[in-house]
Image (tube, grey):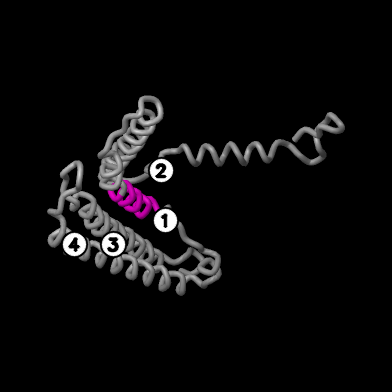
């Protein structure tokens, strides 16, 4: 870092801050699916494409509606309805990918202080609770769609179930993703137990 008052370089600073920032940028821009099996990469990419398409549609509709309203005093009367129908799909694609890629928001301060065996127990309990909650949400969403999904919106005349069914797909899909992650962690745990460190053999 340059010391602006003295016109030189601060002692002990060899560009560490810049290197940390650059490393952070590289990590953010890196492909999150590197190293995954081909099927996993295909699934993630397909869901990612759906999410990008939904987000692009939402942004495009909002921009066109806002521009038309302020520039020509004309607006799309159905814009809000379409956005409300698409937002649940955007949220559920994000949840699914966050589970698949292990980027769900979580606080690990206390978890990291637990011993290894306790960590496995707490992690397993967390997976089970997450799966149960997501399956429950998916079931409730299916029930809601069956009861009220055929109701139509005021302007688009689109079934309101288009939005609610996203919660069903997202709930069951994220639950399945948790099951797969749980299974892989269990296999890794059993492999570690079967193959102790060299000093323990």
| Start-end of magenta stretch | 88-102
Residue holding disc 2: 32
Q: Nearer the viewer, residue 192 or 166?
A: 166
| Label 2 – label 4 distance at C-alpha | 35 Å
SS for callout 4: helix
At x 55%, y 69%, the residue is 113
Residue at figure coordinates x 37%, y 72% from the top left: 125
* Quarter of the rendering occupied by the N terminus: top right
Apparent side of residue 14 relative to residue 60 in the rendered image (left or right): right
Which mark is first along the chain, 4 or 3?
4
Q: Are marks 2 and 4 in contact (CB under 8 Å)?
A: no
Q: CA distance from mark 3 to mark 2?
A: 20 Å
Which mark identifies residue 179?
3
Label 2: few (<14), some or many (≥20) within 10 Å? some
Choose between 28 and 67: the one closer to the eye.
67
The reply to whether dot 4 and dot 1 touch (C-beta < 8 Å) is no
């Amino acid at each position: 870092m340059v010391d602006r008052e003295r016109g030189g370089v601060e002692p002990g600073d060899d560009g560490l801050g810049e290197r940390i920032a650059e490393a952070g940028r590289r990590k953010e821009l890196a492909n999150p699916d590197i190293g995954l099996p081909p099927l996993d990469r295909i699934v993630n990419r397909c869901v990612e494409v759906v999410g990008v398409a939904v987000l692009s549609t939402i942004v495009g509709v909002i921009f066109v509606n806002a521009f038309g309203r302020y520039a020509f005093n004309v607006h799309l009367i159905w814009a809000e309805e379409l956005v409300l129908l698409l937002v649940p799909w955007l949220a559920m694609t994000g949840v699914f990918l966050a589970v698949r890629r292990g980027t769900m928001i979580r606080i690990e301060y206390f978890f990291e202080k637990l011993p290894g065996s306790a960590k496995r127990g707490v992690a397993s309990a967390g997976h089970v609770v997450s799966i149960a909650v997501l399956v429950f949400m998916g079931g409730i969403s299916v029930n809601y769609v069956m009861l009220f999904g055929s109701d139509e919106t005021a302007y688009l005349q689109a079934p309101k179930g288009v939005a609610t069914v996203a919660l069903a797909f997202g709930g069951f899909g994220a639950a399945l993703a948790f099951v797969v992650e749980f299974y892989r962690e269990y296999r890794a745990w059993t492999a570690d137990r079967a193959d102790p460190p060299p000093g323990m053999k």
